[in-house]
Image (cartoon, rainbow, N blue to C red):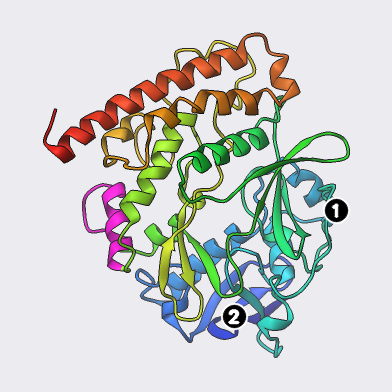
Amino acid sequence: MNKEFVLKHKNIPVASFIMDDESYESGQVKNVYDEKRLPFGSQRAETKESIATYLNRWINYRGIPQSREDFGDIALANKISFGRELSMGSYGLNLTDHYWVHKKEKDYKWEDFNFFDNGYTDNFEMKNNYVKGKQDPNVSVDGTLVKCWNRENGGNVLWKKGRGLLKQEPYNELIASKILDLFGIEHVAYTLGALENGQPVSKCPCMVDKENEYINADFIFFDSKLKGGNLYESYINICKDKGITDCKERIDEMMALDFIIGNTDRHYGNFGIIREADSLKWKRIVPVFDNGSSLFYNEILSGVQNKTESNCIWLPGGNEEHLKLIGYPSWYDREKGKEIPGIVYEGLNKNNRLREVPGKIDEIISVIEQRIKIFENAIQCKKGQVTGVS
């Protein structure tokens, strides 16, 4: 049945709209109360009809995607077809930003429902026993990997499984975190854990709180009038216009890591900015996170020893090709660079499944050593450009 709902940012009404309270498919936008707080299309949405289109897009991205490994089981158990049927039943609340929805007839307050202040049921075994209408931050997480939030030591911690036969992503997150630690690059710190059945999981703390929220690059690009140039330059310019002056340095750090570890899943959803929720002030570039789809995680057989290039989703071309865009990385130390192969080897060697593939770890290390040489040659040219010495 169609009901009028209100989209809120914390306690501030942003827009009201008609939505079916069973399928959670939205339709007509009734009112826009605060255009600048729309989480989508505020620069493009010139009519209520266009806002309705963008609102539907936002709602559909709010829930568990159908591409997630366990979505079929979740859908069958709850008799749903789309993830939004769970997420909107939980008011669309998550642990990423401060947007939520509820029926307009209700006088609900953000303080009474948000997951920063209020508890939720821990799911340490990561079973897909979600219940429609139950307040749960896990029904509003995106991404294809099976994941869940748990409370640990008073904080929110995200657990993520690996996939396929190798279950390698958790180990890769640990490796990437240690490499970033080595060079003092700001990042979300990952540790390695395991379920009772021995399946590995990565664990990382929530990077935002009830005062600050994460806005991903998808909405930044979608909501901006690009001023020519390529996406890399446009992103830097957008952030600079919003007062973030070190965007190039931070994005270059991410691109350097993506090349060295061969990250094939850097997309608009896993980088962006941290915004102060009340003032909407852009504060800083988000710490580097979500690095698991790397180090040939999805290649079961050996035979990778000469594959130095890897795919990038958000920017046309490969990660090696993008080295020409980055500036000279003053953070990089060649002596520390010699430690990277050892960090990778130690991390991969923790994966019993990977050790059973003859020669695979040694081949990956060989590729890492090749990439480090390519990276060092590329930044040597950059150093010459900075100093005027070739």
Total numbered badges shown on the rendered structure:
2
**Above or below, 345 relative to 83:** above
Task: Look at the image and give the residue range highlighted in magenta.
Answer: 226-241
Q: Looking at the image, do the residues carrying marks 2 and 1 touch, with CB atoms under 8 Å apart?
A: no
Q: Is residue 132 visible?
A: yes
Residue 314 visible here: no
Snapshot quadrant of residue 96: bottom right
Locate the C terminus by quadrant: top left
Where does the image place residue 130, in percent across and percent down from the top left? 82, 57
Q: Quadrant of residue 62?
A: bottom right
How dense is the environment of label 2, judged by Cα within 10 Å: few (below 14), some, or many (20 and up)? many
In screen coordinates, is 311 left or right of 62?
left
Q: Amino acid at mark 2?
A: Lys
Q: Is residue 36 magenta?
A: no
Q: Which mark is residue 10?
A: 2
Q: Which residue is at a point 41% across and 23% down the rendered structure image?
A: 371
Please, what is the dominant secondary structure of the magenta stretch?
helix
Kindly state the secondary structure of the residue where label 2 is placed: loop
Residue 282 screen position, x and y as percent: 41, 69
Q: Is residue 205 above or below residue 203?
A: below
Residue under pointer 1:
129
Residue at the image position 73 percent from the left and 77 percent from the top: 113
108 shown above or below 55: below
Identify residue type, mark 1: Asn
Q: Residues within 10 Å of mark 1 (few under 14, many from 20)?
A: few
Residue 237 covered by magenta stretch: yes
